[in-house]
Amino acid sequence: MKLEVEPAVAAAIAAKRAVVALESTVIAHGLPRPLNLETAIALEDEVRAGGATPATIAVASGNAVVGADRALLSRLANEEGVVKVSTRDVAPVIAGGGLGATTVAATVEIAAQAGISVMATGGIGGVHRGAERSLDESADLLAIARHPVCVVCAGAKLVLDLALTLERLETLGIPVIGFGTDDFPAFYVRASGLRAPHRADTALAAARIVREQLARGAGIVVAVPIAQADAIDRHEAEAEVDRAIAAAEREGIRGAALTPYLLGALGAATSGKSLRANVSLLRQNARIATQIALALAA
Ligand code: PSU
Ligand code: MN
């Protein structure tokens, strides 16, 4: 895999300064235009404001790109047919020379190759409801187990089976650290009602655990609850999720298309409230990821 590393990112990595990787599926497939490009830029600005170097990761023109420039961010946000690149898609899309937005799975793989230890996202993928029949489990989980990268997220999406997701994280040996909470956060919702297995109350405390885990050659999840002011009530969200899943089943939406479909349906159902929540948690995760990256680099 050929890495095309942006000069500012390469300089920061070489100098062992803090770098935060950002995924690009959320830009291409997770948020509507023009909010997607605005948010991609806002996330990079959050990282810079916190004192680290952002590196948005994608696949373009036969390379794994580490640090997309403004032109590439704009293409990811606006072009039709940008491929959603998970682990299985990295080699084919690089070989084909196409444009791809990386999921958490592909982002941690590329970040690890580049020597970046921390990434931020909205929510990780996980085990879907009904997985006992569909076997639909995001490649994010196995990728985090395999690559020594700290993934800062707001937990996993409520559209998933969060109890099964925590079971798989346990099996794969991935520590899940509740950031300032004992409860596993559920994306737009502050608390899933399921216990997070570990807890850290500061970026410094989280970084101590992260350092140990990365030294084992494997990844870790730091789960940050969405800010109270932007959170959606659990019962309200649950009802919408049930409706969205039923609609997906009726329309035969499966596989890689399912996550973007469910998030889109939730956005429509909550008349933008879930979009505001999504941007809020993405920004917060970028900030916490920056603090952890700074603590690791110190
Ligand atoms: N969170 C969002 N929007 C997204 C995703 C997460 O708010 O688009 C993406 C992430 O890139 C995550 C992916 O890695 O969904 C998981 O997709 P799948 O379940 O198909 O593995
Ligand atoms: Mn899937």
Image: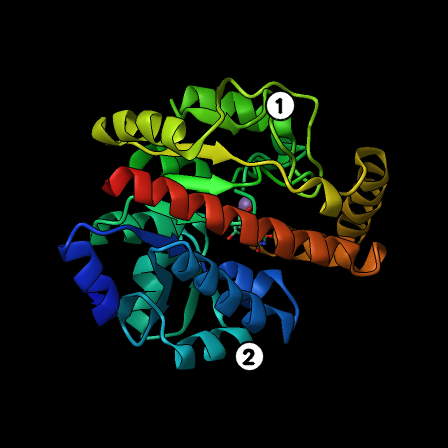
Seen from the viewer's position, the closer of residues 180 and 1 is 180
Q: Looking at the picture, does residue 156 appear above or below residue 95? A: above
266 left or right of 203 in image: right
Q: Does the Cβ of the disc 1 residue fall within 8 Å of ligand 1?
A: no
Q: Can residue 252 be seen in this view?
A: no
Residue 45 appears in view: yes
- Is 269 positioned to the left or the right of 99 in the image? right
Give whichever of 16, 55 is nearer the camera. Answer: 16
Residue 210: numbered disc: none
* Number of marks in picture: 2
Q: Which residue is tagged 2?
A: 78
Give 12 or 170, whichever is nearer the viewer.
12
- Secondary structure of the residue carrying numbered label 2: helix
**Left or right relative to 60: residue 34:** right
Q: In which quarter of the image is the N terminus?
A: bottom left
Q: What residue type is labelled 2?
A: Asn
> Which of the 4 quarters of the picture holds residue 123?
top right
Q: Which residue is drawn at 21% across and 58% down?
A: 12
Q: Describe residue 236's horizontal placement relative to residue 100 as left or right.
A: right
Question: Does ligand 1 reach within 8 Å of label 2's beta carbon?
Answer: no
The residue sitting at 47% across, 59% down in the picture is 46
Asked which quadrant contains residue 294, the reply is: top left
**For residue 133, what is the image quadrant?**
top right
Residue 183 in percent (x, y) is at 62, 23
Q: Quadrant of ligand 2?
A: top right
Residue 47, given in percent of the width and then of the height, sits at 42, 57
Q: Residue at x 42, y 34 (%)?
A: 203
Locate the C terminus and report the quarter of the image it occupies.
top left
Q: Nearer the viewer, mark 1 or mark 2?
A: 1
Residue pictured at 29% horizontal, 44% vertical: 117
* Residue 183, label in figure: 1
Q: Earlier in the sequence, mark 1 or mark 2?
A: 2
